[in-house]
Amino acid sequence: MTPDRLPPPTELPSPADPRPPSDPSTAGSSDRSSDRSSDRSSDRSTELAGRIRAEIEGKPDRRITFARFMERALYEPDLGYYRQSADRPTDAGDFLTAPETHPIFGWTIARRIEQIWDKLGRPRPFTLIEYGAGSGTLGLSILEGLRRHDSTDLLAAIRYEPVESNPNRLSDLRERFERAGLAELLALAGSPSNGPVPVIGVLLANEFLDALPVHRVVARDGRLLELYVGWRDRFVQEAAEPSTPELARRLADDGLDPGQLAEGQVAEICLDLEPWLDEVGRRLARGFVLAIDYGYPAAEMYGPRRLAGTLLGYRGHRVQEDPFADPGLTDLTAHVDFTAVQVLAERRGLHSVALTTQSEFLIAAGLESELQALQSSPETTAEAYLRARSGVVRMLDPRHMGRFRVLTLERRGSAAASDSPAAR
Ligand SMILES: C[S@@+](CC[C@H](N)C(=O)[O-])C[C@H]1O[C@@H](n2cnc3c(N)ncnc32)[C@H](O)[C@@H]1O
């Protein structure tokens, strides 16, 4: 644990903490019903810990990779952090993402999507696929942005396809789209417009890649070892030979030799990037990918400033130092290696167009004009304007969300079947 990852001494977020705290009046309230629900949560966490422990004890080496631990801690059906009924990225949850901070984030992305639609020749249908859509906050604010901008032609062409592994979130999303009168734009799994068919459009992922399980490695005597999870009265970390040569191969893809890591340096490697990019490569016939997350180019991510790696736990808007504490109740996340995403995407015919900070991206896309439009609207109250402005400050602040990265990839494919008049 590096000092800059310690929890902040006050309610203010630490400079290294991109996820702002909630209003203290809403977080951590403890009436009787929340006591009961926290008992149930802790029972579920104990059950999940027991299941993970059983898996470890059933292994010949009595250990599992950290990626497997993280997969179960986050995605175990009903028990994992992202498989429960509670909605996480909200004020009352454990962290706040940019789209949850204020819809102006989505309205600004809507501007970028309008530019992309024009650049692609205004195809119909035009598909917006969002990976890790949660309960649809970003999708809704993008479509609301199109309405605000009077983009009626694009609204007539667009289909929004959420990809979300939590069924609770998907049903929240469906209800919210119905309430907003936007259900007809929704392409949910099983509907004719949602399938393995390649699309023309935009594939979006906001704080999705950082939630994929990661392996952990450590440099010892110029060699790479893997950090596994064992059990000795509690979960413990154990270094041993890597579970797969893919780990060293990934560093090589990044242009790094394990010998370049400092002695004892810990790093995270996300092997799930490849299956995701395989899917992106299959789904996108023509168009753009926007991947927004906190992360770095490999040289920075695996450089001397991050000797302890980038794995973080979050609970109740605070950094949780022990990644093994309370599985299922703690969000686990690691920064994204954007060099790896670029290199692996290029191999799948997705060209890297730009890697910028979130603040650069939002300003170039028109965030300030969006704020001005809100200010000059006679319907905007002073309070609503101030709320938007404070959201904008968080989104642009280089100590917080402003330093997130936005990677734009382009698939320059030829017009596909769904671009043909027959598909309209
Ligand atoms: C950190 S949340 C971000 C939610 C939303 N994008 C936002 O910015 O507020 C990550 C989301 O990705 C979802 N997720 C993680 N892995 C997934 C996968 N393999 N397929 C679909 N959704 C996934 C989680 O259930 C969760 O809703």
Image (cartoon, grey):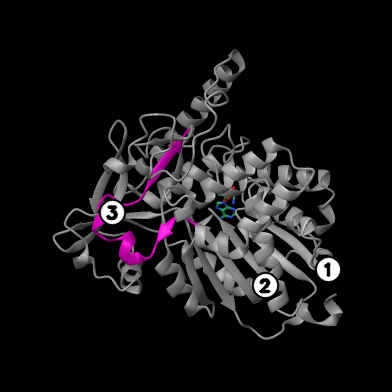
SS class, disc 3: helix
Instruction: From the top left corner, tell me how far across and down residue 262 is, in percent.
Output: 18, 59
Question: Is residue 22 positioned above or below 66 on the image?
Answer: above
- Residue 352, image x and y in percent? 50, 75
**Up-down relation of residue 347 to residue 163 (above or below):** below
Q: Is residue 200 visible?
A: no
Provide the secondary structure element on which disc 1 rests. Answer: helix
> Is 157 above or below relative to 370?
below
Q: Which residue is mark 3?
A: 306
CA neighbours of label 2 inside 10 A, class few (<14), some (14 to 19), many (20+) = some
Quarter of the figure with residue 13: top left
Q: Position of residue 71 (x, y in %)?
A: 47, 48
Boundaries of the magenta span: 293-315
Identify the residue at image location x=57%, y=48%: 392
Residue 49: give x, y in percent of width and height: 43, 34
Q: Earlier in the sequence, mark 3 or mark 1?
A: 1
- What type is the residue that disc 1 sits on? Asp
